[in-house]
Each structure stands twice: as C-alpha cells, then as structure tokens.
C-alpha cells in the first residue's frame, strides 16, 4: 500500500467522519469555548457558602451584599453559557460573560495579584 493510497483512505475517513458529525461540531465548539464559565458557575453552586464568606471577609461588605455578588456571578455565568449554547442573544451573552470577568477581576483582587500577573505575562510571552 503506497503513500497515495494511505492518504486517500485517510481523506475518505475524514470526509465520512465530518459528514456524520457536521451537525454536532458547532455545539461542541461552543461548549469548549464556554467550558470555563460553566465550570466556574457549577463550582459556585456547590461552594456557595465558601464563596460568600470569602467575599464577605475580603471586602467586609456583609452577608447580604456578599450573597448578592455570588448570586449575580452565578446567574451571569450560567445564563451566559445557556444563551451561547442555545445560540440566542449570543452577542449580549458574550458581553455579559466579559462583564463577569471584569467583576471577578476586581472582586477577587486578581488585578493586583503580582503572582497571577507574572504567570499571565509568562504565558503571554511563551505564546509569542
């Protein structure tokens, strides 16, 4: 079996695979793109009290405000994920998810965390 036969067989297999999975690939791609938000939302659901207590002790804002923040964060992430996966209001969902990132950056003091920023810059330089 020559190299041309092997390449032809591989191309035929790839074409057949794409024909069968073509309708599922956009959904899988969207799921991969929002997987971090989905995981973080589920994480917040199961560790509600820890998240609330962290925000309360970090910002000294009280039980109600900390609970409201965690609820807004949870609702924003899961709603954005559902909207992106269902392909409804995708642009608004992406803006909402971007807003959640900005909110978390401030609330969890990520912006001033030197260790996080150094890790981020090391990753950025490695990609160049």
Image (tube, helix red, strand yellow):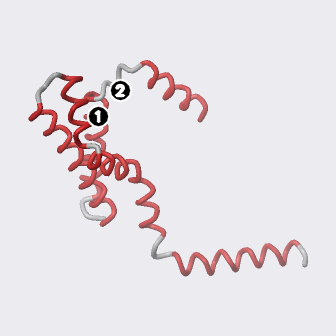
Mark nearer the N terminus (2 vs 1) = 1
**Relative to 125, 27 lies left or right:** left
In the rendered image, the vertical position of residue 95 relative to residue 6, given as above or below: above
Q: Which residue is mark 2?
A: 110
**Relative to 125, 9 lies left or right:** right
> In the rendered view of the protein, which quadrant contains the N terminus?
bottom right
**Relative to 35, 12 lies left or right:** right
Label 2's element? loop
**Relative to 63, 85 lies left or right:** right
**Number of residues whose C-alpha sits closer than 10 Å to that of mark 2, classed few (under 14), some (14–19) or many (20 or more):** some
**Number of residues whose C-alpha sits closer than 10 Å to that of mark 1, classed few (under 14), some (14–19) or many (20 or more):** some
Identify the residue at horizontal 26%, vertical 37% (top origin). 51
In the rendered image, the vertical position of residue 29 relative to residue 38, given as above or below: below
> In the rendered view of the protein, which quadrant contains the C terminus?
top right
Q: Which residue is mark 1?
A: 104
Distance from the alpha carbon under mark 2 to that under mark 1: 8 Å
Q: Position of residue 67 (x, y in %)?
A: 15, 38
Q: Tell me where residue 65 sits by quadrant.
A: top left
Label 1's element? helix
Q: Position of residue 125 (x, y in %)?
A: 58, 28
Q: Tell me where residue 12 sits by quadrant.
A: bottom right
Q: Residue furthest right?
A: 1
Q: Position of residue 107 (x, y in %)?
A: 25, 29
Q: Position of residue 32 (x, y in %)?
A: 45, 56
């Amino acid at each position: 079996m020559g190299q041309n036969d092997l390449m032809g067989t591989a191309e035929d297999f790839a074409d057949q695979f794409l024909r069968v999975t073509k309708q599922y690939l956009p959904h899988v791609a969207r799921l991969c793109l929002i997987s971090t938000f989905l995981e973080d939302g589920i994480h917040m659901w199961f560790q509600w009290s820890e998240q609330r207590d962290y925000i309360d002790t970090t910002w000294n804002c009280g039980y109600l405000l900390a609970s409201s923040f965690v609820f807004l964060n949870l609702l924003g992430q899961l709603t954005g994920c559902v909207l992106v996966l269902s392909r409804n209001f995708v642009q608004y969902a992406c803006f909402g998810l971007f807003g959640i990132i900005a909110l978390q950056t401030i609330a969890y003091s990520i912006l001033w965390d030197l260790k996080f920023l150094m890790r981020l810059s090391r990753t950025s330089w490695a990609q160049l």
